[in-house]
Amino acid sequence: MNFTIDIVSDLVCPWCFIGKRRLAEAVALVEASHPDTRFQFNWLPYFLNPDTAPEGEPYRAFLEAKFGGKAQADRLQSEVAAAGRDAGVDFNFADIVTRPNTLRAHRLVYRAQSIGHRPATIEALVDRLFVAHFQLGEDIGDVATLAGIATACGDIKRDVAEYLQSKAGEQPVRSLADKVGALGVTGVPFFIMQRRLTVSGAQSREVLAAAIVEAMH
């Protein structure tokens, strides 16, 4: 059977990175017992901080302002890092300089899906965007950085750069984010299984796998 999972996330959300990896593990569990299932993933945009300036903002200052100081930010990152290790993600918060506006990154994913890139290519692109921000300290709001990432995933650098330098894809991405909000989604990651069952948060692979199986029936 064909099984669709809509994944609502923001590319600067560490729990979304963890959730992506846990979902992959859940899918592998389900495929082992339901080998005839074919999964389709649709990535939907979410903006944790929609008012972020186009050029982004200093990462550490943002965290400390949002969570109430250095100690609180340190504790948060420690908790996320521990959860990440369990999911096979090694966060490198120390190298993150900029907290970007993610509109361009979301547009890049939207473009890949709308022009029909292979599912494996889209998955690689999304993963590489998370890796760029959380492990390599790259600015995923920067056109040249995003074009380089897309090229590494098999796209054409000039085409991607021209697309990102234009306004193409902005309105559709904003509209998708608005539709997600209208569904009542107020936090990410958020998974919609087969358009009938929802799971909120970076749940364990067992919880996600159980939700997939339940949505099959």
Image (tube, rainbow, N blue to C red):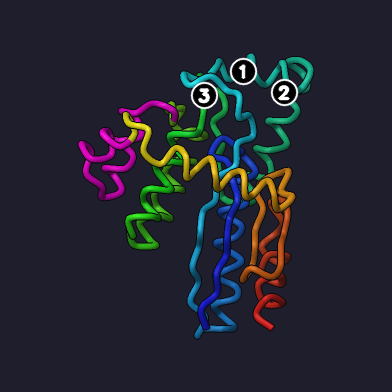
Which residue is denoted by mark 3 in the rendering?
96
Question: Vertically, is 118 above or below 67?
Answer: below
Disc on the earlier residue, 3 or 1: 1
**Residue 211 percent coordinates (x, y):** 71, 70
Amino acid at dot 2: Ala
Residue designated by label 2: 73
Is 162 positioned to the left or the right of 95 in the image? left
Q: Residue at x 71, y 62 (%)?
A: 198
Helix, strand or loop under label 2:
helix
Front-most of 29 and 127?
Answer: 127
Q: CA distance from mark 2 to mark 1?
A: 8 Å
Q: Residues within 10 Å of mark 1 (few under 14, many from 20)?
A: some
Label 3 sits on what residue type? Ile
* Quadrant position of residue 25: bottom right
**Range shown magenta:** 141-163
Dot 2 or dot 3: first in sequence order is 2
Residue flagged by tag 1: what amino acid is it?
Arg
Q: Looking at the image, which is closer to me, 157 or 163? A: 163
Give the image location of residue 121, x and y in percent. 35, 56
User: With 103 as the anchor, is 70 left or right in this view?
Assistant: right
Q: CA distance from mark 3 to mark 1?
A: 8 Å
Q: Are marks 2 and 1 in contact (CB under 8 Å)?
A: yes
Residue 114: image x %, image y %? Answer: 38, 55
Circle 2 crowding by C-alpha within 10 Å: few under 14, some 14–19, many from 20: some
Q: On residue 60, which mark appears?
A: 1
Q: Position of residue 34 (x, y in %)?
A: 57, 83
Q: Which residue: 57% across, 60% down?
A: 6
Q: Residue 168 sits in which quadrant? A: top left
Q: Residue at x 63, y 68 (%)?
A: 195
